[in-house]
Image (spheres, rainbow, N blue to C red):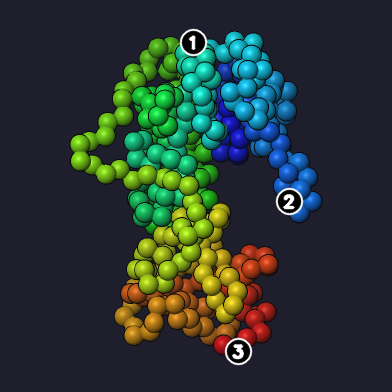
């Protein structure tokens, strides 16, 4: 069960490992793009390539969907980047359902663990496979694997790293369940500990506040790149910033003040330094490097 590309890697890895995939569940086709043509999920495309049985329910509590699901007689369900399942679905197979989550649970429970790990300046994260139960992202842990987050890594790069790592961990988990070698253990929330969470990314999460410290803004830019992208308002337009470098420096300028040589540099002042923009996307235009943007800029610098 899955929808985006992140889930495809796990499906492909299970197929390559010889798992018997009795069926795939993914989201219904949705209109997208300028022409609002119906688009299939990446998981559906992969299922069709491998000629796997496919279900695309609008509602997971639909009796007809659940009847078709039971007809597959699954021993175990693997859930990767999908919707929240009702108990009648996750508790259907004899071995239950397992989920792959892109964090080291119980840290970063929620919808956007990859983004928030970088937004919060973490230096380490990982993937977890766990059993599904009533409360989201709280089931018993099966396997975990850690990975470091380099200081320049962006969310897109971390996504791809965890996607491949997670696929391998899913296969290990399935094999461990099959040979009964895995020992499941509960997630432990230490008394008094406030764990970071990973709620959905909203527009205000993406808006840059130049009064913030340089490091925080830098982590915001890389934590939201390439999607949905950190942005700022500038000269009656919106600039989405995809990559930048940071510099801690003393200055007396108002945060948000910009400077440029008109050729290859464009920077914003922060509370305690500078953000030097490298790649951006002006509203209504394509993503480009800073030199290309400056060449086409008609405003005096």
Residue 265 screen position, x and y as percent: 52, 78
Q: Quadrant of the C terminus?
A: bottom right
Residue 50 badge: none
Give 237 or 78, whichever is nearer the viewer.
237
Residue for badge 3: 300
User: What SS does tag 2 mark?
Assistant: loop
Query: Badge 1: how crowded within 10 Å, few (<14), some, or many (20+)?
Result: few
Alpha carbon separation for disc pair 3 and 2: 35 Å
Residue 94 badge: 1
Alpha carbon separation for disc pair 1 and 3: 69 Å
Q: Quadrant of the N terminus?
A: top right
Asked whether residue 114 is in view, the answer is no
Residue for badge 2: 33
Which quadrant would residue 253 be assigned to in this image?
bottom left
Which quadrant would residue 270 be assigned to in this image?
bottom left
Name which residue lies at 68% across and 67% down.
Answer: 284
Which quadrant would residue 234 be assigned to in this image?
bottom right
Name which residue lies at 57% across and 84% down.
Answer: 262
Residue 135 screen position, x and y as percent: 40, 29
Name which residue lies at 58% across and 31% down.
Answer: 2
């Amino acid at each position: 069960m899955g929808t985006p590309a992140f889930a495809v890697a796990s499906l492909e890895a299970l197929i390559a490992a010889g798992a018997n995939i009795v069926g795939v569940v993914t989201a219904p086709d949705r209109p997208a793009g300028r022409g609002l043509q119906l688009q299939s999920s990446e998981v559906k495309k992969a299922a069709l390539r491998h000629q796997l049985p496919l279900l695309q329910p609008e509602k997971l509590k639909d009796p007809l969907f659940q009847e078709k699901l039971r007809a597959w007689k699954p021993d175990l369900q693997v859930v990767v980047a999908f919707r929240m399942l009702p108990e009648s679905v996750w508790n259907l197979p004899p071995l239950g359902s397992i989920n792959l989550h892109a964090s080291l649970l119980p840290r970063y429970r929620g919808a956007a663990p990859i983004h928030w790990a970088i937004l919060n300046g973490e230096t380490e994260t990982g993937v977890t496979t766990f059993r599904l139960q009533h409360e989201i992202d709280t089931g018993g842990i099966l396997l975990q694997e850690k990975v470091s987050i380099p200081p320049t890594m962006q969310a897109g790069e971390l996504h791809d790293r965890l996607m491949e790592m997670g696929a391998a961990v899913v296969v290990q988990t399935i094999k461990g369940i099959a040979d009964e070698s895995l020992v499941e253990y509960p997630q432990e929330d230490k008394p008094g500990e406030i764990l970071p969470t990973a709620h959905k990314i909203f527009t205000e999460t993406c808006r840059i506040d130049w009064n913030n410290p340089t490091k925080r803004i830098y982590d915001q830019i890389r934590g939201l790149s390439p999607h949905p992208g950190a942005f700022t308002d500038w000269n009656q337009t919106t600039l989405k910033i995809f990559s930048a470098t940071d510099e801690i420096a003393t200055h007396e300028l108002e945060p948000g003040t910009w400077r440029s040589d008109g050729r290859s540099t464009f920077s914003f002042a922060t509370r305690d330094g500078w953000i030097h923009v490298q790649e951006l996307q002006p509203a209504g235009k394509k993503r480009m490097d800073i030199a290309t943007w400056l060449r086409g800029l008609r405003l005096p610098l």
